[in-house]
């Protein structure tokens, strides 16, 4: 019998599916085809292109699989990146920015449920108060 969806390991494809499942979402594509998910014109999850600030400390190779997810507060960010063994991280480029980074290659370290919560929280942090309240109510969370 397969594991329940919420407890299975997450996949990169789940980021796309979860972001698109949120209401009022649009998807744009950057110059290199990277997906940018937005609500009300505000991005909440995007697949970043390789940049000099996110790199393998041993090889110096730029990460090509970084996913940026907004968070509601600096406290939320700190709680996600506090444990270095988790797949969430940040770089000095994102100091003061309400987001965390996730390497796509490490998505499987999260359960589907954990990833779902982070994507939903990212959407909630960027959605209008009216849309956020409606979604919370519709999902029995208010």
Image (cartoon, grey):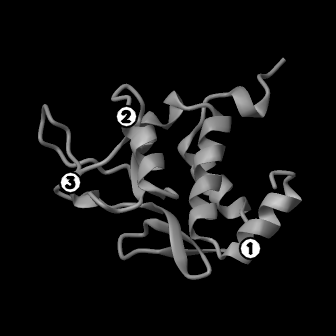
Marks 2 and 1: CB-CB under 8 Å?
no
Disc 1 secondary structure class: helix
> In front: 49, or 57?
57
Task: Mark 2 or mark 3: name the one nearer the start of the chain.
Answer: 2
Quarter of the image containing the N terminus?
A: top right
Task: Mark 2 or mark 1: name the one nearer the start of the chain.
Answer: 2
Q: CA distance from mark 2 to mark 1?
A: 30 Å
> On the rendered structure, is 83 left or right of 3?
left
Quarter of the image containing the C terminus?
A: bottom right
> On the rendered structure, is 28 left or right of 5?
left
Q: Which residue is disc 3 drawn over?
A: 92
**What percent of the width, then of the height, locates residue 8?**
68, 28
Q: Residue at x 44, y 39 (%)?
A: 79
What is the total number of numbered labels drawn onto the structure image?
3
Q: Is residue 83 above or below residue 137?
A: above
**What percent of the width, then of the height, locates residue 117?**
64, 45
Task: Mark 3 or mark 1: name the one nearer the start of the chain.
Answer: 3
> In front: 62, or 110?
110
Neighbourhood count class around disc 1 (C-alpha, 10 Å): few under 14, some 14–19, many 20 upward: some
Residue at the far top in the pictured view: 1
In the rendering, which numbered label is found on residue 82? 2
> In front: 81, or 110?
81
Q: Which residue is disc 1 drawn over?
A: 131
Q: Is residue 127 visible?
A: yes
């Amino acid at each position: 019998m397969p594991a329940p969806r919420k407890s299975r390991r997450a996949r990169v494809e789940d980021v796309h599916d979860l972001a698109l499942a949120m209401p009022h979402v649009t998807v744009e594509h950057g110059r290199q085809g990277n997906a940018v998910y937005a609500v009300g014109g505000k991005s909440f999850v995007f697949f970043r292109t390789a940049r000099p600030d996110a790199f393998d400390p041993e090889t110096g190779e730029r990460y090509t699989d970084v996913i940026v997810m907004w968070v509601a507060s600096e406290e939320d960010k700190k709680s996600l990146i506090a444990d270095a063994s988790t797949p969430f991280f940040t770089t000095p480029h994102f100091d003061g920015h309400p987001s965390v980074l996730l390497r796509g290659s490490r998505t499987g370290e999260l359960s589907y449920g954990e990833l779902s919560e982070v994507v939903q929280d990212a959407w909630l942090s960027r959605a209008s108060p009216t849309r956020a309240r409606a979604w919370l109510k519709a999902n029995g969370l208010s």
